[in-house]
Amino acid sequence: MRWLLSIVAAILVSVHAQAGSLTIRFDAPASDWEREALPIGNGAMGAMIVGGVDEDRLQFNEKTLWTGGPGSRQGYDFGWPERSIAGNVAKVARELDKKGSLAPDYIASKLGRKARGYGDYQSFGELVLLMNGAGEISEYRRELDLERGVGRVSYVRDGVKYTREYFASYPDGVIIVHLTADQPHRINFRARLAVPDNRTAEYSAHAGELSVVGALNDNGLKYAAAAWVLTDGGSRSDLNNAQIGVVGANSAWVVLAAATNYRLQYPDYRGAEPLPAVRQRLNRASELSWARLSERHIADYSQLFGRMTLDLRVAAVDMPTPQLVKQYGSGRADYDRALESLYFQFGRYLLIASSRAGSLPANLQGVWNNFATPPWNADYHVNINLQMNYWPALPTNLAETTLPLYDFIDSLLEPGGQAARRVSGAGGWTLFLNTNVWGYTGLIDWPTAFWQPEAGAWLASEYYEQYRYTKDERFLRERAWPVMKGAAQYWLDTLRVDPRDGKLVVTPSFSPEHGQFTAGAAMSQQIVFELFTGVSEVGAQLGEQGFTAKVQAALRQLDPGLRVGGWGQLQEWKQDLDERDNQHRHISHLYALHPSNQIGAFNTPEYAAAARQSLEARGDGGTGWSRAWKINQWARLLDGDRAHRLLGEQLKHSTLPNLLDTHPPFQIDGNFGATAGIAEMLLQSHAGELHVLPALPSAWSSGEVKGLRARSDISVDIRWNDGKAQEIQLRSGSQQTVTIRSDIFSRSFAITAGEQEIQTSGDGPVRSFVAPAGRVVQIIQRP
Ligand code: FUC
């Protein structure tokens, strides 16, 4: 009986696996790291599966391995001027008062600085597996199973089916490759580690352990990686040239760990020796069987990933992913829906894989990087990119993945305080365009990007957004308030009165990353408005009267950065300077529409119309993240078909065969932004009500989504047919009044919690009711 059950279970599992709707699949090893390799990660570490047959090179990363920073050969000064340049900043502001606008080159010559020792995120190395085998290969398959967080390579050679599974375990802090064959004694390989040559490296192979230790040439940062080779049957031996050989095993697994002596702590950013920590992890992991390690990983991973499903009512498609991407939009609606739902879940997968508590946040490439000098240093750009990385976290039910972001921002307060003082002569904290793992909070010299002091305010506002979703009071008091207060202090000290109208403005101010410097660009004003509004609400809630009153007074005098210009557009600058044919990728002045809620289709229809006009003019092009942002913005304008069109543009023009976003080149923000955009099409909660299916495209006529999250600690499931909601289920964490906007209320409906009927108030599509704590409220359309 037991064996019968397990056969049935095995069949079920294999049917499920065959369905493979949430699997990215290739029929060949990756020949191009960026376009074809498959990413796995546990937040701190990442690896790219290439899946070679004779030689498999698992390229891996660990987030803290960076050149630059304290100890860099180039020198390092956090980007801060030696002496305060507050006088120069004020002078530029006075010049702007007189002239209205100034060229970026001119401002950069006055305020910019050449970065020194900024550093780059590094590839850690490769785990190289050299297979002994000969003969033709057939049935090759390389895939990434998003439901279990496991990569797999399989093929048949010489009558034997070989399978390799790869995963990155968060609970055990290691990356694992498991090698099996469908016949005994067929696992034969040699393993070694390899690291790039910009560091010292001491390799060894001893008692089944491969290790490499050394330090980066540039900054002396110490690193260690080790891999333990474990076998079932056969023999294992340490070989020359720091290799380990396995002969005739039934199966084998290699457990890899890596670390540096980096610590997220200003000013020196150095901590403990890495090798002992690496060995400790390997030691613990090796006490567990392969099966146990895999179980622990899958349980941990799927507990997060499995919280949400999106079903666009398509049968599973059995097609290699590159083909699925290529055919997109060529007429097969079922294939297109399959790709869209896969792409949505891939964004969630990537976030779990690149952002877990205890490490750094996801950078421009998440955690995956194969270059010594990656594009934009694979750093943290904060004029859109880092923020976008975290857009899907809250709505798609992955709130825990934001913890590294907040630890990281917290660590910027001290260096950011120096930046505030030395650049602007202000209190509080800020930073500018970009930051690294070394507290870089100062300036660079790139004229069209270097000046973005609003970045601090934007990041601080994210804390409040986290609270809005989770209602975690302790987080609000202990984490959000100090950061928001410090960011607000900076702006209290630096806003200036605009002689044109007596309003408080940011000056000099620059709308990313084009145009002239002016006073009071729309985005600058909107971001400060967002922060001050947040501080005013949070301060009142926490009883912080004194500071709150100051911020409220400034808020009353603040230019809100919302203006409708000559051609009906939302103005990007305080003066009406917008050119209709400007299709620049940044759409910063629509910050008020998304991610903020200062503009809303119902609350401010005139600004919403202006935002639409601006979006129309900007067009559907742009880099990966730019298209992704536009999906969100069109969704906020409640235009589902247009949002969907942008999603299509993203898939056609900004998506690589392995589904990674391409700026170009590979840059992960577009994946995250698009996933958030899809959530935004299905549910919105920024305007004090839950708007169900606010921007449902006609292409998604039927479907079901489960596990979306709304602000105020509410989970939502929606089932729809013919473009109309049939059933809404929600669960609120606390008893509270909930307002829902849905067409379901325009038809005959029933609303219950268990047996109990719930009273609603309101009429038409908007109804309010008291949701009980922790119980499912069901709204169904009556037949
Ligand atoms: C911003 C963008 C660029 C790029 C870079 C990493 O500066 O304007 O397009 O995404 O970040």
Image (cartoon, rainbow, N blue to C red):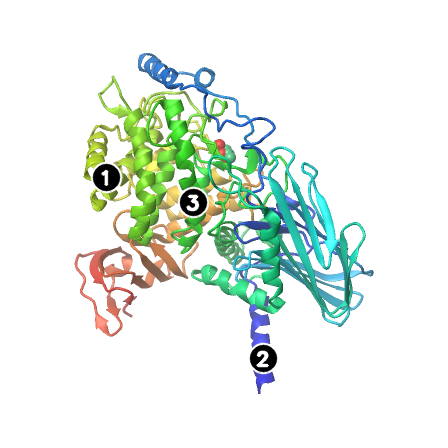
Say left or right for 427 vs 44: left
Q: Residues within 10 Å of mark 2 (few under 14, many from 20)?
A: few
The answer to whether the residues at label 3 and label 2 have Cβ atoms under 8 Å apart is no
Residue 593 visible, this orientation: no
- Please determine whether, in this image, residue 111 is positioned above or below residue 222: above
Q: Using the rendered view, name the quadrant where residue 453 is placed.
A: top left
Q: Which mark is residue 316?
A: none
Residue type pointed to by label 2: Ser
- Please determine whether, in this image, residue 572 is positioned above or below residue 366: above
Mark 1 vs mark 2, foreground winner is 1
Give whichever of discs 1 and 2 has the lower sequence position.
2
Q: Secondary structure at mark 2?
A: helix
Give whichever of discs 3 and 2 has the lower sequence position.
2
Q: Which mark is residue 536?
A: 1
Mark 1 to mark 3: distance in Å? Answer: 24 Å
Identify the residue shown where x is 49% and y is 62%: 300
The image quadrant where one finds the N terminus is bottom right
Q: Position of residue 105 (x, y in %)?
A: 47, 17
Identify the residue shown where x is 24% and y is 59%: 746
Residue type pointed to by label 1: Ser
Q: Residues within 10 Å of mark 3 (few under 14, many from 20)?
A: some
The image quadrant where one finds the C terminus is bottom left
Q: Position of residue 295 (x, y in %)?
A: 55, 67
Identify the residue shown where x is 30% and y is 49%: 468
Q: Which residue is mark 3?
A: 407
Q: Which residue is mark 2?
A: 6
Mark 3 vs mark 2, foreground winner is 3
The residue closer to the viewer here, 252 or 500, is 252
Q: Secondary structure at mark 1?
A: helix
